[in-house]
Amino acid sequence: MFTCLKAFFVPYRHGIDKLRANALKKIAVEDLFGIFDHEVAMDRPEGVTIIHGPNGFGKTVMLEMVAATVQGDLDIFRSIPFREFSVEFDDGSSLRLVCVGTCDIR
């Protein structure tokens, strides 16, 4: 069983290299592990954002999701339970991945 995804790129006409060149403005995930909604603003004037929280709340998973997005490797999203994941960049572009259920892919 794999999670089926729909991806929305707004605007995403420049390809993955353009995403790698832009600074993150915000990352968000809804219903992570069926429990958590997280939104992290990355546009602090100091230039540093610290993500902290108790163990098991999804800090590392969110960063792994961001890394997979920038690397263009969306396979990680098939094994993480979530409803929606989004990344916004400083140039106004964004990426939104929506889990639309599970499907049996063989």
Image (spheres, helix red, strand yellow):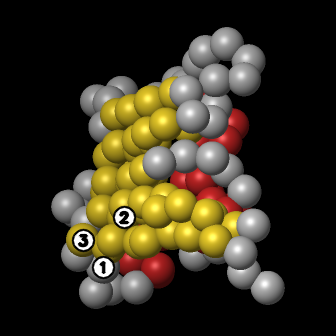
Residue position for label 1: 12
Find residue 23 and report its image quarter: bottom left
Give how far across and how far down residue 93 sits, in percent. 26, 66
Asked whether the beta carbons under mark 3 and mark 2 sit within 8 Å of each other, the answer is yes
Circle 2 sits in a helix, a strand or a loop, which is it? strand
Residue 10: mark: 3
Circle 3 sits in a helix, a strand or a loop, which is it? strand
CA gap between label 2 and label 1 equals 8 Å
Figure quadrant of the N terminus:
bottom right
Give how far across and how far down residue 27 sits, in percent. 41, 44
Give how far across and how far down residue 7 sits, in percent. 41, 72
Q: Residue at x 55, y 27 (%)?
A: 35
Residue position for label 2: 95
Asked whether the beta carbons under mark 2 and mark 1 sit within 8 Å of each other, the answer is yes
Q: Residue at x 64, y 23 (%)?
A: 57
Q: Residue at x 46, y 42 (%)?
A: 29
Callout 2 crowding tier (Cα within 10 Å): few <14, some 14–19, many ≥20: some
CA gap between label 1 and label 3 equals 5 Å
